[in-house]
């Protein structure tokens, strides 16, 4: 495990792009796969260390507006780009063909729809997922999905995590990120690529644990939002987060039993920022539910994807086979999917805490 810092690696082995294979002769090696706020923030970071990038956006009209305005027309509109350094395309095959390092940032419910159009092999590319969600119906983390369905080897799979709201990255505020990959050299090379004066990086081998933690923290942020909407105070919110961390640790120890410290930033740090921050869409979604909104009306008013809504159902289904004690997950599931009143469900939850 490497500590946070911006020190450049002196490793002289082939770059992660060369090691991943693919069209290594192409000068445009990095591709952003998605067009939301986190994708936009990552693109900003990538352009600080790369002359050019590829960027896959599903809608051509969004691309046209982006080029005309020099910023994403729908997300983080204050972040301006030199569009001459970006190769936009609404054709996923064109982007994957030209790039060797694919950074996946599409919402997890829509990932399969994008991939259905794909004809280029993914196994030869370095695939890094910044998607903090489960692939619905498959009930797999994104890296598991790429490995099992697209035969991508483990050393060509990575995950990006940590307390990192896109809005703060866009403002250049200090951010700490963890790159998880079974290949430590590739993890370090990508971490070095992301490091800057406001981004500090470290590496980990716990790909699956980090991914599941990223899913669960969204579920717990919804719980925090529900409690906020019900007028529970900061005292209880602290107890809720403490219990959420214990619940997360129990699940990770069951699904991927390796040595880890749950107190690292990619676990506890991400949980805290998602549960407390004003930028957390999952917390906002939960708060609306606690205030009496229906799931549908909250989704419509937000106009953004709250990954935790989908993640709650997937995690509940996964845990039916694992039988981990997860009262917070169960409570959020009962509120969102069984339509049990938040006042009743949260009161039962409070009685279970110590």
Image: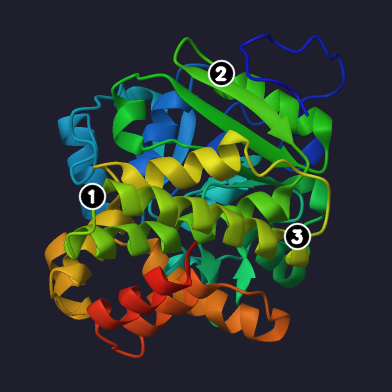
Task: Estimate the spatial distance between the alpha carbons at disc 1 and disc 3, rounded to whole Å.
Answer: 42 Å
- Residue named by callout 1: 62
| Label pair 1/3, CB-CB below 8 angstroms | no
Callout in the foreground (1, 2): 2
Residue 332, percent from left and from top: 39, 74
- Classify 10 Å Cα crowding around label 3: few (below 14), some (14-19), many (20 and above): some
Q: Is residue 11 above or below residue 321?
A: above
Instruction: Provide residue 279's location: percent of width, then percent of height.
Output: 27, 42
Residue pictured at 37% horizontal, 33% vertical: 41
Tag 2's secondary structure? loop
Q: CA distance from mark 3 to mark 2?
A: 30 Å
Residue 39 location, quadrant: top left
Callout 3: SS: helix
Q: Residue most toward the right? A: 13
**N-terminal label among 1 and 2:** 1
- Which one is nearer the viewer's eye here, 163 or 128? 163
Q: Which residue is mark 3?
A: 253
Circle 2 is placed at which residue position? 195
Left or right position of 148 against 137: right
The answer to whether residue 113 of the structure is visible from this angle is no
Marks 1 and 2, Cα distance to the nearest angstrom?
Answer: 29 Å
Is residue 282 at all visible to an observer of this figure? yes
Residue 172 versus residue 350 in the image, above or below: above
Please name whichever residue, 260 or 74, is drawn nearer the observer in this view of the structure: 260
Q: Looking at the image, is mark 3 or mark 2 earlier in the sequence? A: 2
Above/below status of 17 relative to 21: above
In the displayed structure, 255 sits above or below 313; it is above
């Amino acid at each position: 495990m490497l500590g946070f810092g911006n020190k450049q690696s002196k490793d002289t082995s082939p770059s992660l792009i060369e090691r991943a294979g693919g069209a290594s002769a192409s000068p445009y090696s990095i591709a952003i796969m998605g067009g939301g706020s986190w994708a936009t923030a990552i693109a900003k970071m990538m352009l600080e260390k790369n002359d050019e990038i590829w960027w896959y956006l599903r809608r051509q009209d969004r691309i046209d507006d982006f080029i005309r305005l020099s910023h994403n027309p729908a997300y983080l509109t204050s972040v301006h780009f030199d569009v001459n350094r970006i190769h936009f395309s609404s054709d996923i095959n064109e982007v994957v063909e030209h790039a060797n390092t694919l950074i996946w940032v599409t919402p997890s419910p829509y990932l399969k729809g994008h991939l259905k159009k794909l004809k280029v092999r993914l196994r030869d590319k370095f695939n890094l997922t910044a998607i903090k969600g489960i692939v619905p119906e498959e009930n797999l983390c994104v890296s598991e999905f790429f490995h099992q369905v697209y035969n991508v080897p483990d050393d060509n799979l990575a995950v990006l995590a940590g307390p990192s709201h896109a809005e703060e990255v866009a403002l250049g505020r200090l951010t700490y990120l963890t790159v998880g990959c079974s290949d430590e050299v590739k993890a370090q090379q990508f971490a070095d690529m992301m490091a800057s004066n406001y981004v500090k990086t470290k590496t980990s081998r716990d790909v699956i644990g980090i991914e599941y933690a990223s899913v669960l923290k969204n579920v717990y942020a919804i719980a925090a939002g529900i409690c906020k909407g019900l007028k529970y105070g900061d005292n209880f919110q602290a107890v809720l987060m403490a219990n959420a961390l214990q619940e997360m640790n129990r699940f990770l120890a069951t699904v991927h039993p390796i040595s880890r410290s749950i107190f690292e930033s990619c676990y506890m740090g991400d949980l805290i920022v998602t549960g407390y921050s004003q930028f957390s869409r999952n917390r906002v979604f939960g708060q609306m539910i606690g205030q009496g909104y229906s799931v549908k009306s909250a989704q419509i008013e937000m106009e953004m994807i709250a990954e935790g809504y989908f993640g709650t159902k997937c995690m509940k289904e996964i845990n039916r086979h694992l039988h981990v004690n997860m009262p917070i997950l169960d409570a959020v599931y009962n509120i969102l999917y069984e339509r049990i009143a938040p006042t009743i469900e949260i009161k039962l939850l409070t009685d279970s805490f110590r």
